Amino acid sequence: MVYAVIRVRGTVNVNPKIKKTLELLRLSRTNHCSLIAENDVSKGMLQIAKDYVTWGEVDSETLASLIESRGMLVGDIPITADYLKDATSYKDISSLAEDISKEKISWKEIPEAKPVFRLHPPRKGYEGIKRSYKNKGALGYRGAAINVLIKKML
């Protein structure tokens, strides 16, 4: 299972421990998204940063549209199917997204791919950036509802 982690809150007055955790998650600005594998270390990091990020399990369909529209190579070159054919063994973006969601390959293994997806703010805005998702806010774990948020941000 792969988590999509999106930074919701800004950088002012952040605790140094949380700031370092966000750096390790590669989330330096708001509305940046990164993909991380589900393990004990990443779950602990997400618990530390839960007041600044939202996360959930991303499905392969949403991941394919995320890579297609917001995936970038070094030099701000968009990722295309032609590039994937030349640089990897994948023929199209959907098969790559399916293998990433099943953890057969990680996003880091794609050569020259940037680790962060820069997203737009969500249409109709966040629910509230100071409350958790369970309390009708935008922060913390949201499960499969992360796919809806990502589609609003593309």
Image (cartoon, helix red, strand yellow):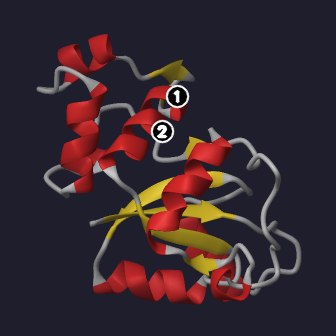
Outermost residue to the right: 12
Mark 1 Cα shell of 10 Å, populated few (<14), some (14-19), many (≥20): some
In the picture, measured across the screen, residue 93 lies left or right of residue 122, that is left
**In the rendered structure, which amino acid carries the disc numbered 1?**
Ser
Picture residue at 57% right of the left edge, 88% below the top: 48
**Res 20 seen here:** yes
**Res 25 seen here:** no
The x, y position of residue 6, in whole percent, is 60, 61
* Residue 69: image tag: 1
Q: Quadrant of the C terminus?
A: top right
Picture residue at 46% right of the left edge, 73% below the top: 143
- Of the pair 149 and 86, the residue shown nearer to us: 149
* Residue 66: image tag: 2
Relative height, residue 79 to residue 111 (above, below)? above
- Real-space Cα separation, disc 1 to disc 2, in angstroms: 5 Å
Q: Quadrant of the N terminus?
A: bottom left
